Image: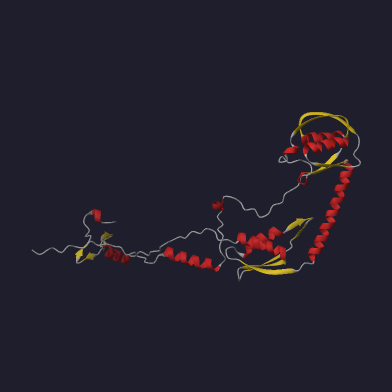
């Protein structure tokens, strides 16, 4: 008896699109990245914090910060007709701080305080004789003067600072002006120019001033900055922080044009058949017809 030839089960394991689109897309992205600098991932969610570029610590010449514990300790004292300068000397020893008393400060003081913070007691002694103080705890120094003397000293220092600032500006005006080109890889020249210009522009007395000049160069995707060397160093630091590659999403899509001939070819590959609107699409395997339509369930209307 002849052994019946067993029909082979059709197995469709060949993809319609043989190329790995995702892999090819990743290769193209890596090629573009190699043309630029080593990217810094601008992933805010990953860092979970802001990056500090600069910091300016302001000085307070009127109040004493809480971190100076000796100047916040509670004190108790009783002054009976004590010379004011000697009273300030005792306060200096208790608070372990240098207190300079002006020559115009004179007189005696009588006061009794119990369990009062040092800084509150010090201000109370100033108010009793209508004196003022310049407090610089960072330098461990406090100056006590009459209000008129202290105001005169501050006015002189302000005028002196203004003169020094003008001198520094005059000296810096003779520094050489340099022009440098900064090539961009991930942001546009317009975006870089807007950021840099806003960073360096200052407004005062109804006019604006910028120590640098920024020019866009769209052809080479870069900006040209003209200014002093120290300002160009700041520009370079800022560009390195903002011209970074961000996370990208690769979208994989396939566009297939389906026609009646495509359906017939697809049926031949899959070994399937169906009838739709009196049109039969199907195929055969080894001479056997697959998927002969029968009944209402086999027809797709």
Q: Residue at x 87, y 45 (%)?
A: 151
Direction from residue 40 to residue 7 in the image, left or right:
left
- x and y, in percent, of residue 126 in the image: 84, 36
The quarter in which the N terminus is drawn is: bottom left
Nearer to us in this view, 225 or 228:
228
- x and y, in percent, of residue 294 in the image: 21, 56
Nearer to us in this view, 291 or 156:
156
Q: Which residue is drawn at 83% across and 59% down?
A: 166
Q: Is residue 133 above or below residue 263?
A: above
Direction from residue 36 to residue 103 in the image, left or right:
right
**Which corner quadrant of the image does residue 79 belong to?**
top right
Residue, far bottom: 219
Residue 126 visible? The answer is no
Nearer to us in this view, 286 or 63:
63
Count of numbered labels shown in the rendering: 0
Residue 46 visible? The answer is yes
The quarter in which the C terminus is drawn is: bottom left
Direction from residue 287 to residue 125 in the image, left or right:
right
Q: Residue at x 80, y 61 (%)?
A: 169
Task: Give the color scheme: rainbow, by chain, secondary structure or one colour.
Answer: secondary structure
Nearer to us in this view, 94 or 266:
94
**Which corner quadrant of the image does residue 99 belong to?**
top right
**Which corner quadrant of the image does residue 264 belong to?**
bottom left
- x and y, in percent, of residue 243 in the image: 60, 62
- x and y, in percent, of residue 33 in the image: 53, 65
Residue, far left: 1
């Amino acid at each position: 008896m002849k052994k019946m030839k067993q029909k082979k089960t059709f197995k469709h394991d060949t993809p319609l699109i043989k190329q790995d689109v995702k892999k090819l897309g990743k290769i193209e992205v890596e090629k573009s990245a190699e043309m630029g600098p080593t990217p810094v991932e601008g992933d805010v969610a990953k860092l979970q914090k802001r990056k500090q570029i600069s910091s300016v610590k302001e000085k307070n010449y009127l109040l004493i910060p809480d971190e100076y514990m000796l100047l916040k300790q509670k004190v108790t004292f009783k002054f009976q007709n004590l010379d004011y300068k000697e009273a300030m000397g005792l306060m200096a020893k208790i608070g372990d701080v240098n207190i300079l008393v002006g020559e115009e400060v004179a007189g005696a003081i009588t006061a009794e305080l119990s369990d009062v913070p040092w800084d509150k007691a010090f201000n109370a002694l100033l108010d009793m004789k209508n004196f003022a103080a310049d407090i610089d705890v960072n330098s461990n120094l406090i100056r006590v003067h009459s209000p008129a003397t202290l105001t005169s000293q501050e006015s002189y220092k302000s005028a002196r600072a203004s003169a020094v600032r003008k001198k520094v500006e005059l000296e810096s005006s003779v520094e050489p002006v340099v022009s440098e080109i900064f090539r961009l890889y991930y942001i546009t020249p317009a975006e870089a120019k807007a950021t840099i210009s806003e960073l360096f522009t200052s407004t005062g007395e109804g006019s604006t001033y910028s120590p640098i000049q920024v020019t866009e160069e769209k052809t080479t995707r870069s900006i040209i900055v003209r200014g002093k060397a120290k300002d160009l160093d700041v520009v370079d630091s800022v560009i390195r922080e903002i011209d970074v590659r961000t996370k990208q999403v690769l979208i994989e899509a396939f566009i297939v044009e389906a026609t009646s001939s495509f359906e017939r070819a697809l049926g031949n590959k899959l070994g399937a058949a169906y009838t739709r609107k009196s049109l039969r699409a199907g195929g055969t395997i080894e001479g056997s017809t697959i998927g002969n339509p029968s009944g209402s369930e086999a027809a797709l209307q």
